[in-house]
Structure formats: structure tokens, C-alpha cells
Amino acid sequence: MPETVLLTGATGYLGAALRSRAVVEGARCLAVGRRPRAEEGYRQLDLAAGPEAVAALLRAERPQVIFHLAGGAAGDPFALNLPPLRNLLAALRSIPGYLPRLVTAGSAAEYGDLGPDPIDEGARERPVTEYGVAKLAQARLVALARRGGLPTVVGRVFNAIGPGMPPTLASARFAREVRAAIASGARHVTVGDLSTVRDYLDVEDVAAALWALGHGALSDPIVNVCSGEGVRTGEVLAEIQRQLGVSLEVRTDPGLVRGPFDVPVSVGRNDRLRAALGEAPRFSLPRAVARLLDGG
């Protein structure tokens, strides 16, 4: 019998990558999301509506691993991220003796602005956005569930890049703007702050990391999902231009600069992830940009 896993937030960018990973691993993946889709293995289920529907699904299917990716940053981050997790945890508590592993996707936004040095999981979090606060609250709820006996781990994802990225994220926006400039004959592209430094992994590697956290030895409650290397945001734009064969003037739009709500440097330490994977995750900006452009 193949392993059964439950994937919430399956229609999202990372959810699609993790669903593909489950197929590669030969697992039976129960994918759920708020949007209707006519796909085999997919069920429309709104976790924010209450615990009853997901509890019925858990009782019927008994997945061995649950990957919780439902939530988001576009809109009210507290409404989007906290009710779905609270309802999932309530559903799990309602089933006596049922203790699947729960892998929750966290965010580097939970750390906030902690300076230029790589951040380890023991750092004191100081989020600077409501989204970061909401994701940190998620991590605290998961910690309570872990204390109550549920096997849990939070994978704090730094920056995933690759095909299918939401157009609001910087890398996807850069690709769209450069292509629009090429199509219109414009000689410039308008961006925000290119001096920020971020820690990237290809979205496929993020999915592989979360999968590993769902199946390896469970000891650390939080694991950074990152490459451990900083890449300046301007380098991403430059690589996109290089691969599209243009060299456009770069203009800064003050309206795209986030000021005090941005973080100059966000790079993680990945010692725990290396232990979980058995090797250091590697990031190639040219490969990731090529996949982004091919898929977008």
C-alpha cells in the first residue's frame, strides 16, 4: 500500500511543487484547497470554514503525513493563516489516538530584521510585517501541538524561486516587466530596492526539503529551508535581463520601496536542513531563472 499524505494549500505555488514531489515518491496525495478544480486526487475544502470537514476527511483517509501549506500574504495575513491551522489542529485533536506527522510551511518573515549574519533557528524572532507576525503565531500554535504529543516540524522557507511564482513576488515581477519592456520597445524597467539580499532555493528543492522533513528523523521543531547563501536582488534582475538578451536602464520607483517594513539582509543557516537531507542544498541562480522564464 502506498503512503497517504494530505496536502493543504495544494493550488498554491509551493503546493503544486510539493504535490509533484509526492507523485515522484509514489505516495497517494490527498490535495485540498479552497478553489474548485476538476483534478484526480483533489478536493475542494475550505479549512477556514471550520474543523468538521477536514476532521471527516482525516477519519476516512488517515494520512500518515500532513503538509500544511494553506494560507497566504495577499490580504489579511491573520485571517488567511491562523484559522486554517487552528481548525486543522482542532480536527486532529478530535480523533483519539491519531498522531500523523504535521509539517507546516513557515517563513523567513518570522525572523524579521536580525542583521547581516546568517540566522539560525534559535534566534529570537522580531518580525517587521503583519505577515511575519501571523506566520510566527502559526509556529507557536504548532509548538503547542508538539507539546501535546503531535509529531510536528515547521520548515521556515526563505525565498523560493521557479516556475509558477505569483506575479506579485519580485523575481516574477522582474520577468514580467522585462518582457513587457521588450514587447513595447521600452528602454527601461521600473523596480524597487535592488540592494536587499535574500536567500534563495529553487521551488523544487524547497518541496524536496519539506518532503524530507516529513519522512526523516524528527528532532528539531523548526528547520530553516534555505541555501545559506545571500544573493542581492539586483543580481536576479541582471540574470533575467542576461537570459532574455537585453540591457535595460533600471529606474527606481519610490512607491515600490517598502522602507522600514523591508529587511536589508535575510539569509539563513541551514545546518539542520543539511542534517535532514544528508547533503547541503545547492542553489544556482542561472538555473532557477531559466526555469522561471520557461514556466512563466
Image: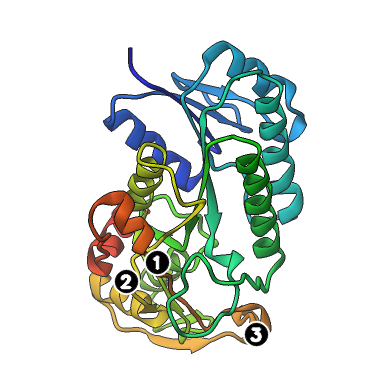
**Element carrying mark 1:** helix
User: Which numbered disc covers residue 259?
Assistant: 3
How many numbered discs? 3
**Residue at coordinates 36% horizontally, 72% vertically from top-left?**
182
Circle 2 residue: 240
Proximity of marks 2 and 1: CB atoms separated by less than 8 Å: yes
Three-letter amino acid code of the residue under disc 2 = Ile
> Is 62 in front, or is 109?
62
Q: Nearer the viewer, mark 1 or mark 3?
A: 3
Residue 17 seen in the figure: no
Three-letter amino acid code of the residue under disc 1 = Ala
Q: CA distance from mark 2 to mark 1?
A: 6 Å
Q: Is 263 located above or below residue 28 in the figure?
A: below
Q: CA distance from mark 1 to mark 3?
A: 23 Å
Q: Position of residue 281 (x, y in %)?
A: 27, 59
Label 1 crowd bin: few (<14), some (14–19), many (20+), radius 10 Å:
many
Q: Is 23 located above or below residue 75 in the figure?
A: above
